[in-house]
Amino acid sequence: MTEKPHVSGSYWLRTAPGGAARPALEDDLDVDVAVIGAGVAGLSTAWELARAGRSVAVLEAGRVAAGVTGHTTAKLTALHTLKYDKLRRTRGTEGARLYARSQTEAIEHAAEVVAELGIDCDWESRSAYTYVCDAGRVDELRAEAAAAKEAGLPASFVTETGLPFPVAGAVRVTGQAQFHPRKYLLALAEDLVARGGRIFEHTTVHGLDEGTPCRVSTGTGATVTARDVVVATHYPIFDRALLFARLSPRRELVVAGNIGTDRDPDGMYITPDEGTRSVRTAPLDGESGDRLLVVTGEHFTPGTGDTRERFDRLSAWAHDHFPGVDLTYAWATQDIDPTDTVPMVGPLHPGAHHTYVATGFGGWGLSGGMMAGRLLTAQITGEECAWSGLYDPRRLRTAVREAPALLKLQAEVAGHFVGDRLRPAPPVDSLPPGEGAVVRVGGDRLAVHRDDAGTLHAVSPRCTHLGCLVSFNAAERAWECPCHGSRFDTDGKVIEGPATKPLERRDI
Ligand SMILES: Cc1cc2nc3c(=O)[nH]c(=O)nc-3n(C[C@H](O)[C@H](O)[C@H](O)COP(=O)(O)OP(=O)(O)OC[C@H]3O[C@@H](n4cnc5c(N)ncnc54)[C@H](O)[C@@H]3O)c2cc1C
Ligand code: FES
């Protein structure tokens, strides 16, 4: 029997599919600031800059808010699983305080924007919880609650939650929020354009010439000239400070479905147990009062392992822990973990004067992306920001502490670069419909996918970023690179960077 992809697409994209279609960039343009990428980080930055009186152009390879931001869980919280106990050890009490304040102010600011612009984005105030069921981890949670409180959050250790199963302990932070990320960002895009900002979709950026002014070149052939450039492409497509040595991609799965009217666990939950499980609900469209349960988990390096089995495990967990849930959605997306766990927001490299980056949100890029928008706007307009140093991508202070994580990451990348080339290649005839593999044909390796009709599609297996070998994800029908997370469709087109060029088509 033909195996169908496990994915149905994101609920957020299904329920807010539209937004005005934006043109591709056709003619050269001159602006104060060019922002590359229209996810939460890029759009928040562009909007803040337009509000500060700058002329802005946003260049987006796909559609607005349809990248990671269109596939997220959309909790807006400063409680980031287990962050503060580690932060106070690595960045001191002041570093932990600045982190809490920067994230909290970003969320409060978003609430003000929602009110000011009258955005209908299902904004709901909720408590956020990090919980464990394993009694052996309770001390860790108590330490996290104490550190989060010391950092200034309304945090406490509790043993009762709204979950329909017992927990050994939890950190609770009150006054957090959840929302519909795409409804929020489509409204922000609309307001940006009303303020004179320009947004170009289907415009892939390929080149950046740093100078006075900077020049950004695009796949359409048109160029944008700008005093300042912000690289908000999730994984940075320009990396002149070898940031990729400190960033690792992490793919995660999401399943969602109707939980009815009266089984809402009334809160936003995450546990580091079982390879992470994250839970929230959202109002289902319609008048019924039904709630959508959204469950996230099963994180892994893109291009490794069997994603279908992982979807099955996550769905089984959702059914076991929330009996009666009717799962109808499944999708996947990925975020980037920095080796020292703090996002990188600020100048692109040590010699940069007018180029900036926002990346490495470690699973918390909604508050992080909103924070980045305000931080980069302050830097571009020449204002002080108390947390510039904390998020500075050029930071070296933590380099020694980071060393073990950095070495581990580089060893993994080297393992993929060399080891994946030694993998035995299956014969092409053995590929069933829906599958793909790196095979040997003659003396060449080819990445080959057999579609449902039996037709073979062949592309080069060498990732166009830095040359690692891609692997096939059968659940999502995509080629994925384990080194830095680039993803390509079955004909080699880029779905997700840092690669900006397609895998070369090959004849078979
Ligand atoms: C499963 C999961 C759940 C999550 N849940 C939460 C949560 O509950 N709360 C939270 O705070 N965070 C959460 N996160 C993290 C958060 O979703 C991300 O950190 C955030 O959305 C990243 O935003 P971004 O703007 O950096 O990236 P994106 O939204 O991916 O935007 C980048 C944009 O750049 C464009 N682009 C890329 N290359 C080019 C190019 N060459 N030219 C032009 N454009 C380009 C892309 O098309 C894309 O639209 C979650 C992450 C995952 C994986
Ligand atoms: S994403 Fe860097 S080599 Fe593929």
Image (cartoon, rainbow, N blue to C red):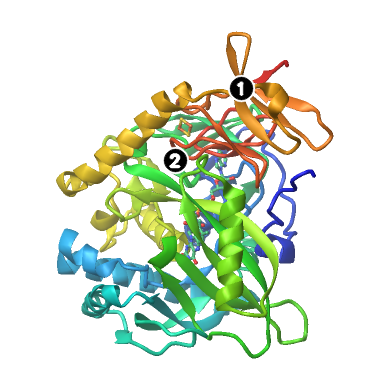
| Mark 1 Cα shell of 10 Å, populated few (<14), some (14-19), many (≥20) | many
Q: In this rendering, is residue 401 above or below 127?
A: above
Residue type, numbered disc 2: Pro
The label on residue 439 is 1
Q: Quadrant of the N terminus?
A: top right
Query: Which one is earlier in the sequence, the residue at label 2 or at label 1?
Result: 2
| Mark 2 Cα shell of 10 Å, populated few (<14), some (14-19), many (≥20) | many
Q: Position of residue 185 (x, y in %)?
A: 60, 63
Of badges 2 and 1, the one in the foreground is 1
Q: Position of residue 39 (x, y in %)?
A: 55, 54
- In the rendered image, the residue lying farthest to the top is 443
Q: In this rendering, is residue 422 above or below 223?
A: above
Apparent side of residue 428 relative to residue 94 in the rendered image (left or right): right
Secondary structure of the residue carrying tag 1 is strand
The label on residue 236 is 2
Q: Position of residue 426 (x, y in %)?
A: 61, 24
The label on residue 215 is none
Q: Position of residue 210 (x, y in %)?
A: 40, 31
Q: CA distance from mark 2 to mark 1?
A: 30 Å
Q: Residue at x 64, y 53 (%)?
A: 64
> Is residue 242 visible in this depiction of the protein?
no
Secondary structure of the residue carrying tag 2 is loop
Q: Nearer the viewer, residue 111 or 84?
A: 84
